[in-house]
Structure formats: structure tokens, C-alpha cells
Image (spheres, rainbow, N blue to C red):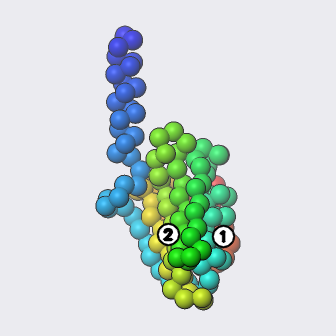
Amino acid sequence: MKALLIGMGTAVLLSACTMGIQPGGDFPTVSYTVPRSYQTVYLRVQNQADECLRGKKQYDVHATVDPAMQTGTVAVRAPIGGVEVARSDIEAIDSKHTRVTHTVWGPSPWDERALAAMRHSVLMDMSVCVVYK
């Protein structure tokens, strides 16, 4: 019985490696341009992730910004295994326009509805959490 439990635990841990957003994978994505500076968009995306995408503090928000390149990434990850379930990449086009790409894992709640909430948050400049609360 003990060996069976250990085997099942190992299988679950190994399957986590194939979960979440993986490089080169085919995941729900939306890209668009907004008439705002990358700093404003970065802060909005970070705030929406913190308010809406963490669940009941079940996920961690990891945000990085590169002022020299005028880019930023906000990722939502599971605390165990670091499985990435949502990510927003931002890049300044010029001082007043920013390219935004949101990617989600795919299974609910990380699906098309999540993408819509993420996009509306940036466009409306307020956190939209409809699918999470």
C-alpha cells in the first residue's frame, strides 16, 4: 500500500511538469495595442493579477519589468511546482502605446473567459474579476 501511494505521488509530481503554460505550446492567447504607456499598463496588469487571478491566495503573482527595454511580464504561478497558469507580456511601442499579450493555460478557470477579464482590465483601466469571484 505504501509503495502504491509513493508511486501515485510521484506520478502526480511528474505530471505537474506537463501542466501549465509551456514554451512553444498552443495556449489561449490574445494580443492587442493600447494607447497607454507601458508603465501604466504594467501596473494595471499587476494589480488585476493580484486582485483577481490569485484565487484565495492559492497562486503567486511574479512581476518583472525591464525599464531599459520598456518591457514587463506578470505571471501567475502555483506555489508548488511553479506551474504557470496565466501570463501577461507587455512591450512599449512608443511613449504612448503598448503591445499586450495575455496567455492562459486553457482549463477553467484559466480559459477564454479569463483572457476576456484580463483584456477588459487593461482597456477599462480597472480590475475586472468576473470569472474569478
How many circles with numbers are drawn on the protein?
2
Secondary structure found at label 2: strand
| Mark 2 residue crowding within 10 angstroms, few (<14) / some (14–19) / many (20+) | many
Locate the C terminus and report the quarter of the image it occupies: bottom right
Can residue 119 be seen in this snapshot?
A: no
Query: Which residue is identified by label 2?
Result: 89
Across and down, in percent, residue 21 comes to 40, 55
Q: Residue furthest front?
A: 68
Q: Which amino acid type is shown beneath numbered disc 1?
A: Leu
| Mark 1 residue crowding within 10 angstroms, few (<14) / some (14–19) / many (20+) | some
Q: Residue at x 59, y 78 (%)?
A: 38
Sequence-earlier tag: 2 or 1: 1
Can residue 106 be seen in this snapshot?
A: yes
Q: Residue at x 37, y 10 (%)?
A: 1
Mark carried by residue 105: none
Relative height, residue 67 to residue 4 (above, below): below
Q: Quadrant of residue 96?
A: bottom right
Across and down, in percent, residue 116 comes to 51, 69
Secondary structure found at label 1: helix
Q: Which amino acid type is shown beneath numbered disc 2?
A: Asp
Q: Residue at x 53, y 58 (%)?
A: 75
Query: Which residue is identified by label 1?
Result: 43
Q: Is residue 58 left or right of residue 23?
A: right
Q: Residue at x 51, y 86 (%)?
A: 93
Q: Residue furthest top?
A: 1
Across and down, in percent, residue 128 comes to 63, 67
Q: Is residue 64 left or right of residue 40?
A: left
Q: Nearer the viewer, residue 12 or 23?
A: 23
Across and down, in percent, residue 71 comes to 53, 73
Q: Nearer the viewer, residue 3 or 64?
A: 64
Q: CA distance from mark 2 to mark 1?
A: 12 Å
